[in-house]
Image (spheres, rainbow, N blue to C red):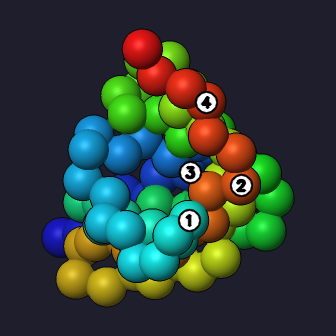
Amino acid sequence: MGMPLEFNTMIVTKGNEKRLEENMFSLVKDGYRIYPLDIPIEVKRTKDGESTGIAVIQKLEMQDDKTMIIYQLISLYTTN
């Protein structure tokens, strides 16, 4: 039995993002997740943590109970 579908309105990385290019990243999450594409959304390291920046998701792929997104960081907030 597959996992339920989840709708996410922010990107929570938990430090698992991989840099592809200067401001392009990929992130794989467990389960099937829908994200808004082509609109700016918040990026956070943890769900309840502070926002680390704003990104636009350019690709969303679901396979084998995992979701992979490729996103472009369009603004980065400084972290202390």
Task: Specify the amino acid type for callout 1.
Answer: Asn
**Gap in Å between the C-alphas at discs 4 and 1?**
13 Å
Residue 7: mark: 3
The quadrant where residue 15 appears: top left
Q: Which amino acid type is shown beneath numbered disc 2?
A: Ile
List the residue tagged with mark 4. 77
> On the rendered structure, is 38 left or right of 50?
right
2 and 1 marks in contact (CB < 8 Å): yes
Q: Earlier in the sequence, mark 3 or mark 2?
A: 3
Residue at mark 3 to residue at mark 2: CA–CA distance: 22 Å
Percent across and percent down for residue 47 are: 41, 26
Under mark 3, the amino acid is Phe
Residue ID for mark 2? 74
Q: Nearer the viewer, mark 3 or mark 4?
A: 4
Q: Earlier in the sequence, mark 2 or mark 1?
A: 1
Instruction: Tell me the SS state at disc 3.
Output: strand
